[in-house]
Amino acid sequence: MREYQEELRGHVARKRFGQNFLVSPGIIHKIVEAIGPRAGDTVVEIGPGLGALTGPLLERIDHLHVVEIDRDLIARLRQRFPPERLTIHEGDALKFDFSALKGTGPLKIVGNLPYNISSPLLFHLVPFAPLVHDMHFMLQKEVVDRMVAAPGSKDFGRLSVMLQYHYHMERMFVVPPGAFNPAPKVDSAIVRMIPVDFLKVGAGGLCIPGIPLRGQVTAKDPTLFAKVVTAAFSQRRKMLRNTLREFISEADLAALGITPTARAEDIPVADYVRLANSLADLAAR
């Protein structure tokens, strides 16, 4: 921790990269405990910054991958950690192919995500969900609240539907602004994301692929499913019979058991999947 504090004093946070560095030892410990890294895991940290989580993670595992865009921070990480312990992937996480790091052990992705790109980054990670054991991220609390929101709440939106289709999500705990330097103007939160297509078994967290936990049918046409969800939430104040007019008639909505006068936030994920599948079946005829 002393090394990290020295690094922190020598670096000025860059706003264009959305940098806020963790400085609370208690919060850092709590996050690492939530991640629960084990020998044999392939752990990837997005945006390691000055190594607040990097060091504690390397106390639990032999090797860590990190994705970092800031060249100054990369230089500091190389000085602090030997290459046999830390592999640095220089570049933009929004363009990184996380599937390239999948090995024989569980793949875990973690990070204190830059708040200015959090939603695009979450969507970028979706295609890699079938390869991932779990993910733990620090995000703006408002974003986490939207991710885990239930239908009928004001926070339930496109992000909620698209992520809940792919993951079981849990808000772990809230992190106050004072845990960072510089302190952000908002609360943060830790979210745990477990892909729905994996079943975790036993204390070791063994993943068995092929046993769906989704609780609803699978979208037959994922692209169509995404388009329907986007259209439904394009104008939140309008009813579904209006926002989905180009996809389906009011009568056909009702026939599916979906209230045409409902608004997008009133419909659970499973209903969006049923709706998209009905449209896919019609298109295939």
Image (tube, grey):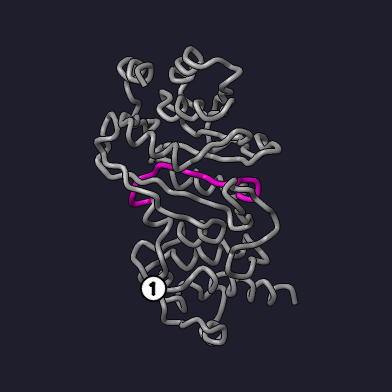
Q: Position of residue 87 (x, y in %)?
A: 58, 23
Q: Going 44% across and 54% down the picture, which residue do you hit? A: 170
Image coordinates for residue 39, horizontal then vertical, percent: 60, 33
Q: Write the residue at 40% across / 42% down.
A: 138
- Bounds of the magenta segment: 129-143
Measuring from the top left, give residue 158's x and y in whole percent: 46, 60
Give me the residue at 71% from left, 38% from top. 104
In the picture of the structure, the residue carrying the numbered disc 1 is: 238
Residue 257 left/right relative to 172: right
Q: Where residue 142 sits in the image (x, y, percent)? A: 33, 52
Q: Secondary structure at mark 1?
A: loop
Look at label 1 and name its amino acid: Lys
Q: Quadrant of residue 85?
A: top right
Residue at 50% over, 40% down? 36
Q: Is residue 130 left or right of residue 1?
A: right
* Numbered circles on residues, count: 1
